[in-house]
Image (cartoon, rainbow, N blue to C red):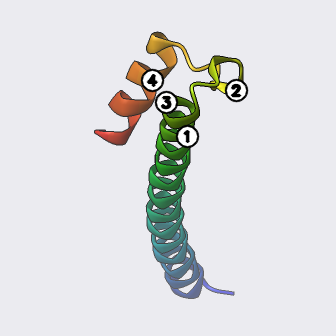
């Protein structure tokens, strides 16, 4: 394999890796949004039922860090 073919191969692999990273980041964002919706649903159920023992153990610090990660 000559250097031109090798360079072309590397460039194609790099483009493919960048595309895959973009897709994975988009899927991660969707998963984080889904997690937030589930947490909100659980919190709503706790408020409606008054069942404080079933409340998710999410601290204010965890909630803040999750919100910050979503805005990145």
The residue sitting at 57% across, 25% down in the picture is 50
- Badge 4 vs badge 1, beta-carbon distance below 8 Å: no
Q: Gap in Å between the C-alphas at discs 1 and 3?
A: 5 Å
Q: Is residue 40 above or below residue 7?
A: above
Callout 1: few (<14), some (14-19), or many (20+) C-alpha neighbours within 10 Å?
A: some
Q: Residue at x 34, y 29 (%)?
A: 68
User: Which residue is disc 3 drawn over?
Assistant: 47
Q: Is residue 19 above or below residue 69?
A: below
Alpha-carbon distance for marks 3 and 4? 18 Å
23 or 67: which is nearer to us? Answer: 67
Q: Are marks 2 and 1 in contact (CB under 8 Å)?
A: yes
Where 23 sits versus 8, above or below?
A: above
Return the residue at label 1.
Answer: 45
**Cα distance between the residues tagged 3 and 2:** 10 Å
Ranked by sequence position, the earlier of labels 3 and 4 is 3
Instruction: Tell me how far mark 4 sits from mark 2, CA to CA.
Output: 17 Å
The secondary element bearing badge 3 is classed as helix
In terms of secondary structure, where does tag 1 sit? Answer: helix
Residue located beneath label 2 in the image: 54
Label 4 environment density (alpha carbons within 10 Å; few <14, some 14–19, many ≥20): few
Is the Cβ of the residue at disc 4 closer than 8 Å to that at disc 2? no
What residue sits right under mark 4 in the picture?
63
Q: Are marks 1 and 3 in contact (CB under 8 Å)?
A: yes
């Amino acid at each position: 394999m000559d250097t031109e073919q090798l360079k072309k191969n590397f460039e194609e692999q790099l483009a493919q890796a960048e595309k895959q990273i973009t897709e994975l980041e988009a899927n991660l964002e969707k998963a984080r949004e889904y997690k937030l919706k589930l947490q909100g649903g659980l919190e709503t159920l706790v408020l409606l039922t008054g069942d404080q023992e079933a409340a998710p153990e999410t601290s204010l610090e965890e909630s803040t860090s999750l919100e910050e990660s979503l805005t990145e």
